[in-house]
Image (cartoon, rainbow, N blue to C red):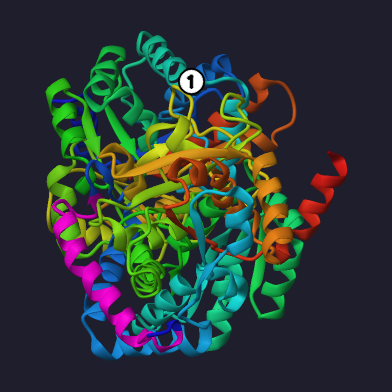
């Protein structure tokens, strides 16, 4: 059987129901992954979170919901995405075979559309006419603006002022799609502050607004729900690997900001103990400098944006500024399930610098004719080490979570100044 | 009986409601905060909330965000806040209630934080982003150390939540008067009377309302139209302090005189 005959609808339905069973087992306490997760939010939001949790429970057991989502993922977003053998890159490193899960080929140019579609359908079920979102690189903002246009929602996107500058192309795209982009000038003017501002909007307008959180972060049920909507990536990759290679990969590699694309590819492999799950954080200028965004590598336990996880903070619990060349990874927190996977040792978390990511971006352009997003380039930057470690018999799946068109200006100025 | 309970008992006996001004600790420096706090006590404040600044105050509007930024820029820490409460406690018996976010408390540990609060003479604690579902350990720590755990209820809270929150709360219940974040507004919050009535049907614990109170008329109408036990005023006082020209002493006097006027509105 070839990739194109993959029964996508079945894969999607399977994804959502399988996750449902797993999720119930994990959630011994509501919305916790081990000690992590929870619902640390102002009282005003508690009823809305309960409503969302209930609606999601109903939706994922509803055949009509699953079919509609599967249809949209196929015909609107372009699923399934290929699992592509990166032949020249494999030769270049001379080690393990490298396969790219091509989420960059999805409509809007990144994996974010999987979750935006799912949550838009939920918002419609809850009869909320307005969507809001936070965005860093702008990919989640574009995905949200896209589904808002597709379904006729009013849409406001919060984006740090610094990010509106470095991702100007995406700001214009969101406006073309009919969304209002609200620049956020508080704090560090990046993703963290955009998230604060989106939360403040939600507290004010929760009765008629749904907040599409763009990663596996935030209060329960977001980390679980966003994971489930992205798990289709891992489901497909697993099936494709079995069909094409008659075996599972030795490792799945993905970049980690909040961790949505990583959780999406990791989750269906969690029970496959032979598959290493490797998350790559943004080391910025280096882990031993203050200028990085690697809470799993260098953070400590704390609460940010509604859940307990690893965060970057000082000893008094104040959140520290972060740095990454990639706006989508420039965030001091990470999804609580990643924190749990780290603590139980099921996933490994490493970090690569801005410079390594830039180099990986250029290499993929030249070796494969694919321009990856700066975010995804962090995953690629771990390949020199991993291909060598696993050797020629090894198989690696890299989640190529987004394409790099949006980053051309940033890359150009970084290369010219270096 | 806790200092908070005694305060409300005395107020009820006089058919009076509490005025609860808020200061952001360390805005713009510790000495000013101390003077401002004592000036509010002198102006008739019944309880004083001491905001312990956090980098990401997502329940707060622009005024308190700015105050928190000034305080953090000035180097204010949790230890400074607790030391300030200890200093002020020597000069006034007015109940003092620290208000903060969960992360700084989580870093110290619930039990250790409750113990420190008790030691410095704080009476109760409000944690803006800690609903009771996440707070059983905190309630236990508060009870062990004699520190009241003040939880919030909002217009969106359904009856099941009102029942659960009133069970976990002690000292008083903080009724969020309107949807949204903190910040001065001029209207009488439309949903507050209904919320107070719903809470009152579950408990006798005193209820203070906050979010958006800024004028004597607005406070008087709210006190007349509901069984509220107190009114919290934060952003409006900070706005007054911020916008007053002159020395810190003059700015403190301007804010304290506003507090005096608002206190009058809570009397029968």
Residue A136 appears anywhere in the view: no
| Count of number-bearing discs | 1
Q: Main secondary structure of the magenta part?
A: helix
Q: Nearer the viewer, residue A385 or B27?
A: A385
Q: Nearer the viewer, residue A312 or A182?
A: A312
Q: Chain of mark 1?
A: B
Picture coordinates of residue B37 (x, y %)? 47, 23
In this rendering, position of residue A297 left or right of residue B169:
right
Picture coordinates of residue A40 (x, y %)? 33, 47
Label 1, secondary structure: give it: loop
Q: Nearer the viewer, residue A178 or A415?
A: A415
Say which residue appears at 43% left-offset and 37% top-offset. Answer: A296
In this rendering, position of residue B146 left or right of residue A162:
left
Mark 1 surroundings: few (<14), some (14-19) or many (≥20) residues within 10 A = many
Residue B157 found in image quarter: bottom left
Residue A150 appears anywhere in the view: yes
Up/down of B102 relative to B30, above or below: below
Question: Is residue A18 a member of the stretch shown in magenta?
Answer: yes
Residue B75 found in image quarter: top right
Picture coordinates of residue B211 (x, y %)? 44, 50
Q: Residue furthest right?
A: A416
**Where, quadrant-wise, is the C terminus of chain A in this rendering?**
top right
Picture coordinates of residue A175 (x, y %)? 70, 75
Question: Is residue B238 a member of the stretch shown in magenta?
Answer: no
* Residue that badge 1 annotates: B77
User: Which residues lie in the magenta part?
Assistant: A4-32
Say which residue appears at 52% left-offset and 82% top-offset. Answer: A77
**Where, quadrant-wise, is the N terminus of chain A in this rendering?**
bottom left
In this rendering, position of residue A107 left or right of residue B109:
right
Say which residue appears at 36% left-offset and 15% top-offset. Answer: B92
């Amino acid at each position: 059987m070839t990739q194109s005959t993959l029964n996508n609808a079945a894969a999607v339905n399977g994804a959502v129901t399988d996750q449902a069973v797993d999720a119930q087992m994990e959630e011994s306490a509501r919305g916790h992954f081990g000690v992590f997760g929870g619902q640390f939010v102002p009282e005003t939001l508690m009823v809305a979170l309960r409503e969302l949790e209930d609606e999601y429970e109903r939706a994922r057991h509803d055949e009509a919901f699953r079919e509609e989502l599967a249809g949209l993922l196929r015909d609107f977003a372009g699923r399934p995405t290929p699992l592509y053998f990166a032949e020249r890159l494999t030769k270049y490193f001379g080690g393990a075979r490298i396969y790219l899960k091509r989420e960059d080929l999805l409509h809007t140019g990144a994996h974010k559309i999987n979750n935006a579609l799912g949550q838009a359908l939920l918002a419609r079920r809850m009869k909320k006419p307005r969507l809001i979102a936070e965005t860093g690189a702008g990919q989640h903002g574009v995905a949200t603006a896209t589904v808002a246009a597709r379904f006729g929602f009013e849409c406001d996107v919060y984006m740090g002022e610094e990010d509106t500058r470095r991702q100007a192309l995406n700001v214009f795209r969101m406006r073309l799609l009919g969304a209002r982009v609200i620049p956020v000038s508080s704090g560090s003017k990046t993703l963290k502050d955009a998230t604060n501002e989106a939360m403040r909007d939600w507290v004010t307008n929760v009765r008629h607004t749904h907040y599409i959180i763009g990663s596996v972060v935030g209060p329960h049920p977001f980390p679980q729900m966003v994971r489930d909507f992205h798990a289709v990536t891992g489901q497909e990759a697993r099936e494709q690997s079995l069909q094409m290679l008659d075996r599972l990969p030795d490792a799945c590699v993905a970049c980690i900001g909040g961790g949505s694309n990583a959780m999406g590819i990791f989750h269906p492999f969690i029970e496959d103990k032979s598959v290493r799950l490797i998350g790559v954080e943004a080391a910025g200028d280096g882990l031993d400098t203050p200028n990085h965004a690697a809470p799993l590598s260098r953070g400590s336990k704390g609460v940010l944006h509604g859940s307990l996880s690893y965060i970057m903070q000082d000893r008094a619990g104040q959140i520290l500024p972060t740095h990454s060349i990639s706006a989508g990874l420039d965030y001091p927190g990470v999804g609580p399930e990643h924190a749990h996977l780290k603590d139980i040792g099921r996933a490994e978390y490493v970090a690569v610098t801005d410079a390594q990511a830039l180099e990986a971006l250029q290499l993929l352009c030249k070796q494969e004719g694919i321009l990856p997003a700066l975010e995804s380039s962090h995953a690629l930057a771990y390949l020199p080490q991993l291909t060598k470690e696993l050797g020629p018999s090894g198989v690696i799946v890299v989640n190529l979570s987004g394409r790099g068109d949006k980053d051309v200006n940033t890359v150009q100025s970084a290369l010219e100044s270096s | 009986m806790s200092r908070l309970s005694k305060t409300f008992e005395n107020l009820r006996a006089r058919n009076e409601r509490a005025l609860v001004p808020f200061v952001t600790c360390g805005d713009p420096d510790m000495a000013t905060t101390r003077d401002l706090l004592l000036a509010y006590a002198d102006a008739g404040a019944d309880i004083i909330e001491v905001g312990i600044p956090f980098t990401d105050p997502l329940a707060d509007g622009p005024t308190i965000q700015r105050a928190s930024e000034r305080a953090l820029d000035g180097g204010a820490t949790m230890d400074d806040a607790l030391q300030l409460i200890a200093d002020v406690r020597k000069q006034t018996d007015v109940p003092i209630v620290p208000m903060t976010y969960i992360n700084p408390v989580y870093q110290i540990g619930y039990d250790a934080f409750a113990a420190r609060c008790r030691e410095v003479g704080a009476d109760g604690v409000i944690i803006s982003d800690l609903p009771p579902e996440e707070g059983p350990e905190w309630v236990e720590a508060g009870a062990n150390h004699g520190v009241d755990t003040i939880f919030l209820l909002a217009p969106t809270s359904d009856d099941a939540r009102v029942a659960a929150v009133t069970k976990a709360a002690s000292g008083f219940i903080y009724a969020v008067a309107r949807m949204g974040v903190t910040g001065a507004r001029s209207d009488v919050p439309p949903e507050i009377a209904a919320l107070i009535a719903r809470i009152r049907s579950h408990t006798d614990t005193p209820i203070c309302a906050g979010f958006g109170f800024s004028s004597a008329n607005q406070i008087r109408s709210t006190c007349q139209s509901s069984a509220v036990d107190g009114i919290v005023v934060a952003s409006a006082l900070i706005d007054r302090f911020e916008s007053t020209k002159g020395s810190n002493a003059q700015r403190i006097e301007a804010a304290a005189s506003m507090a005096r006027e608002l206190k009058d509105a809570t009397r029968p």
